[in-house]
Image: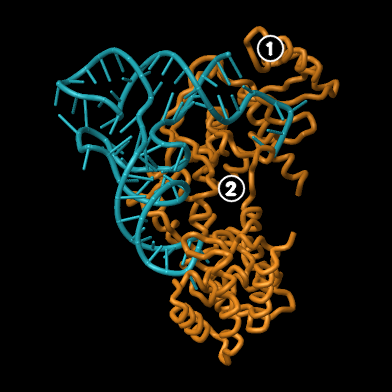
Chain colours: A orange, B cyan
Amino acid sequence: MQSQRLSLYRSFAEELVQKGRAYFCFCSRERLESLKSQTEDSGFSGYDRHCRDLPAEELERLLASGAPYVIRQKMPLTGSTTFTDAVFGSITVENNELEDQVLLKSDGFPTYNFANVIDDHTMAITHVVRGSEYLSSVPKYNLLYEAFGWEIPTYVHLPLIVGQDGRKLSKRHGSTSFDDLVAEGYLPEAIVNYIAMLGWCPADNREIFSLPELCRNFDISGISKSPSVFDYDKLSWFNAEYLRAMQPADFLELIRPRLDLAFGEMEYDGPLLAELLQPRLTKLNQIGEMVGFLTVRQTYDPALFSNKKSKSTPESAMSVLPKAIEILSHLSDWNRASIHDALMKLAERLDLKTGQVMWPVRIAASGQAVTPGGAIEILVILGKAESLERLGIGLDLLTNPGP
RNA sequence: GGCCCUAUGGUCAAGCGGUCAAGACGUCGCCCUCUCAAGGCGGAAACAGGAGUUCGAUUCUCCUUAGGGUCACCA
């Protein structure tokens, strides 16, 4: 199989030699090297076409001697080559800018560029779609197609996607693979959607597209020529949009593995957690840290009980907490409605603002200034026993601030 | 360095001779509100510079500038 391929490339390369569009080159690596160092200051670059016009006898002799050789493409010395790209339009290059590139290496393998043309043709490729970094090699390709008498494919060069620094994304340079992005917690659908919007824009400016919709709406005319910067913020927005658009049940199924991981042996209220997480999540891998406080009691600074907007202070908290504990401990039904009513009633009875009781309760229950969900939801998830313990701990913290 | 490409807010990006120069992300403010989100409303923010062509240039041409790509017996 492999050797069949190799002889295929070889025969095509030799066909070109027959046609006078390629030639054998016996130059040594050393000569090529010294050529390179010489040309650095002279301005001229590339191979000097030394073997391009070897005398027939010389060629015969070298071939017969079994000297290693490569086959090079014989570029026209004059004129220019023009091609049309579906997005970049008409591009012209002077032929004398083109180097007599190697087609077949001395080990018998074709170079990438040569194999590319042969493969595309033998596979009857009609449209070549690739990144615009290949724009400058099109003339070489076309000269090959032309030499063979083959039909030139339609070229569609896409603008590059670059990093924050404006440079092409590459393996060495901040590239992230699709799989990496998925591992980071982005949904495949969101990634596809976002990337499609880089360098392409539909006539109506719409942004959210499923893959089938993309296929239906895509049009080459919407492709832009300038490179675009990969923006994680925007990707996150797309991801969040997809997350929020999901059916609650589907969302729960999606995050369940991560919840299982976060909660371990502990039981948890999946539907409620899903409800809290769905509008707050931008990336799947945030789940762990978002729910961590529910499984592990946090140590926190009692200063957290202070909050201006909620009109909560350590003092007010100290007076509210005992009453909240009291009233909650007598609750027989532990659910959103019952807890809500109990706490609201407490606020009313004490003539306090809602926030003045909710804030300290939430802080004591979570140990965090910011939580997904409010005091009520957190209490529900924690369960009565754990909730009351945490509230008690919070009260202790206020009573004995420590050193 | 040669050649090629590109150039509208911080980012993506409409525009294709006449617009108060869209929209989205982000950002800022307000509302909603038991924190944070989500949601609603509003604000700031751009045609790289210079010559032309034209009655009129973001739009067409040229130059400059700036960025990028590419220059292997790599793929």
Q: Tell me the element at label 1.
A: helix
> For the C terminus of chain A, which image quadrant?
bottom right
> Which is nearer the N-term, disc 1 or disc 2?
1
Position of residue A353 measured from the top left corner of the image (x, y, whole percent): 44, 71
Question: Does any portion of residue A374 appear in the rendered image?
Answer: yes
Residues under labels 1 and 2: Cα distance? 40 Å
Q: Tell me the tag on residue A123.
A: 2
Q: Nearer the viewer, residue A160 or A233?
A: A233
Position of residue A116 measured from the top left corner of the image (x, y, whole percent): 62, 39
Q: Nearer the viewer, residue A88 or A358?
A: A358
Q: Residue at x 61, y 60 (%)?
A: A303
Subunit under mark 1: A
Q: Residue at x 49, y 50 (%)?
A: A234
Q: Nearer the viewer, residue A376 or A45?
A: A376
Placement of A88 over or under B49, stated as above or below:
below
Between marks 1 and 2 in the image, the one whose residue lies nearer the viewer: 1
Position of residue A192 measured from the top left corner of the image (x, y, whole percent): 52, 55
Q: Tell me the tag on residue A40.
A: 1
